[in-house]
Image (spheres, grey):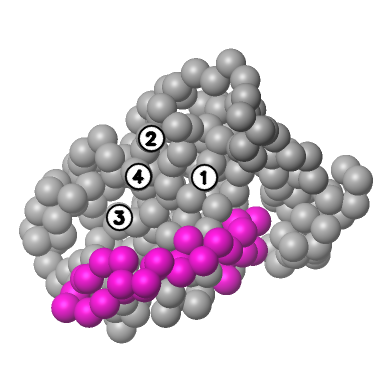
């Protein structure tokens, strides 16, 4: 490992040459093969989202979010207006374009950029709420790929963060599958819903992105799915192959 020192021979971090603050993320559509990410528009998307989230009658998908399930559209729309229409967090909805899907061209989930820090080149993905309509399809993976691709390829950020309740093992498992590295637990980071949250931190940095991007593209390729739409190789397998091909 290379070590660096300043003029006083004190150990310091590696140089970041010619750094310039990065652009703020545009609130524009990100187009993929199986889905597109559109800026949240309440008039266009609220009915689809309400119905998609209602496909989880248990409300389990809201457990680790800051809100409880909504039982009427008016309250849901009010929540969208108050919580999801600002610049940070910056919300997008997932529009299903998976061929043959029963929810084709409908909003089936949402996610946001947040804690956006252009000066440092750091940005977080969060408020992820994917309905059951996205399960066992490439839509959810591609949605996360599109958001990551914008951060690194379009905007040139250095660090992409994922944070969740440390009790949310599924979220941590999903982040690891997507290539995020676990960094640790921030104890008693916040309270929500009347309970403590120790927060798990994970990240992807710009140096890791080229290999991850290659793995995503290979996983999302049409020839990685059989006629029933089932994957032939996992994303982790594609990551291993991409790493081996770049070493």
| Lower sequence index among marks 2 and 3 | 3
Residue 119 position, x and y percent, is 41, 27
Q: Determine contact: label 2, label 3, CB under 8 Å.
A: no
Task: Give the percent coordinates (x, y) of residue 195.
Answer: 22, 79
Please tell me which residue is depicted at 9% across the width and 61% down the height of the picture. Answer: 75
Whichever of labels 1 and 3 marks the residue nearer the N terminus, that label is: 3
Do we see residue 92 in this rendering?
A: no
**Could you tell whether 63 is left or right of 73 in the image?**
right
Left or right of 58 in this view: 31: right
Q: Is residue 119 magenta?
A: no
The quarter holding residue 25 reads top left
Is mark 2 in CB contact (under 8 Å) with mark 4? no
Numbered badge on residue 117: 2
User: Viewed as shown, does residue 193 lie left or right of 124?
Assistant: left
The question of residue 192 being in magenta is answered with: yes
CA gap between label 2 and label 4 equals 9 Å
Q: Which of pointers 3 and 4 indicates the residue nearer the eye?
A: 4
Sequence-first disc among 2 and 1 = 2
Q: Are marks 1 and 4 in contact (CB under 8 Å)?
A: no
- For the residue pair 224 and 80, the one nearer the viewer reads as 80
| C-alpha distance separating marks 1 and 3 | 29 Å
User: How many marks can you see?
Assistant: 4
Q: Which mark identifies residue 114?
A: 4
Q: Secondary structure at mark 3?
A: helix
Q: Which residues are magenta?
A: 173-201
Which residue position holds label 3?
48
Q: Around disc 4, counting alpha carbons within 10 Å, would you say few (fewer than 14), some (14 to 19), or many (20 or more)?
A: some
**Callout 1: few (<14), some (14-19), or many (20+) C-alpha neighbours within 10 Å?**
many
Q: Work out which residue is located at the far bottom of the displayed protein and give it.
A: 58
Task: Please give the name of the residue rendered at 83% of the width and 49% of the height, measured from the top-left corner.
Answer: 242
Label 1 sits on residue: 160
């Amino acid at each position: 490992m290379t070590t660096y020192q300043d003029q006083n021979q004190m150990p310091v971090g590696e140089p970041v040459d010619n750094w310039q603050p990065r652009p703020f993320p545009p609130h524009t559509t990100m187009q993929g093969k199986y889905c597109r990410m559109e800026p949240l528009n309440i008039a266009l998307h609220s009915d689809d989202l309400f119905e998609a989230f209602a496909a989880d009658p248990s409300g389990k998908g809201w457990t680790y979010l800051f809100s409880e399930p909504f039982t009427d559209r008016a309250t849901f729309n009010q929540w969208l207006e108050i919580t999801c229409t600002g610049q940070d967090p910056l919300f997008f909805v997932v529009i299903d374009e998976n061929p043959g899907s029963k929810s084709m061209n409908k909003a089936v989930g949402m996610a946001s950029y947040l804690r956006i820090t252009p000066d440092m080149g750091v940005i977080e993905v969060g408020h992820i709420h994917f309905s059951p309509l996205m399960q066992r399809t490439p839509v959810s993976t591609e949605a996360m790929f599109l958001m990551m691709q914008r951060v690194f390829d379009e905007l040139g950020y250095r660090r992409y963060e994922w944070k969740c309740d440390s009790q949310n093992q599924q979220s941590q498992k999903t982040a690891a599958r997507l290539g995020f590295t676990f960094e640790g637990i921030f104890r008693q980071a916040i309270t929500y819903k009347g309970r403590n949250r120790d927060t798990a931190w994970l990240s992807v940095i710009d140096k890791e992105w080229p290999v991850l991007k290659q793995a995503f593209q290979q996983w999302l390729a049409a020839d990685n799915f059989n006629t029933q739409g089932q994957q032939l190789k996992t994303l982790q397998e594609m990551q291993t192959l991409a790493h081996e091909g770049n070493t």
